[in-house]
Image: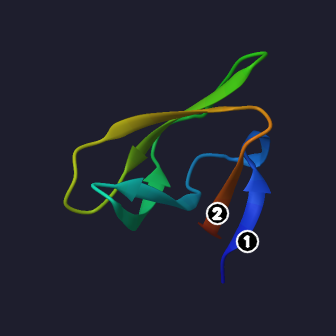
Amino acid sequence: MAIDVEVQRLQLGDVILVDIADKHVEAKIVRAVERTETSIRATMRSEGHEDFILEWPLDELVTLVRGP
């Protein structure tokens, strides 16, 4: 089951849908989420890809596939 959540709710271990090379893939948050006054930053891991960092503004929604 997948649900849209505000990025402020993301935490270590969450799995979300992201776009990599024009494909929707599942990526897991593998380090503590960094929070600032204006954005959220997370280090992600997806099978077959190197770790990468994504950053979203606070009002963004993401699709959560699994929680921690």
The residue positioned 22% from the left and 52% from the top of the image is 49
Q: Which corner quadrant of the image does residue 25 belong to?
A: bottom left
Local crowd at mark 2 within 10 Å, few (<14), some, or many (≥20)? some
Label 2 sits on residue: 63
Residue at horizontal 33 percent and vertical 57 percent from the top: 46
**Residue type indicated by callout 2:** Thr
Mark 1 vs mark 2, CA separation in Å: 5 Å
Q: Does any portion of residue 66 appear in the rendered image? A: no
Q: Quadrant of the N terminus?
A: bottom right
Residue 47: x and y in percent read 27, 63
Which residue is pictured at 77% across the width and 32% down the height? 58
Residue 23 lies, in percent from the top left, at 34, 65
Image-quadrant location for residue 27: bottom left
Q: Which amino acid, by three-letter code, is at mark 1?
A: Ile
- For the C terminus, the quadrant is bottom right
Q: Are marks 1 and 2 in contact (CB under 8 Å)?
A: yes
Residue behind mark 1: 3
Q: Nearer the viewer, residue 5 or 34?
A: 5
Between residue 27 and residue 19, name the one nearer to us: 19
Q: Neighbour class for label 1 at 10 Å: few (<14), some, many (≥20)?
A: few
Residue 4 visible in the snapshot: yes
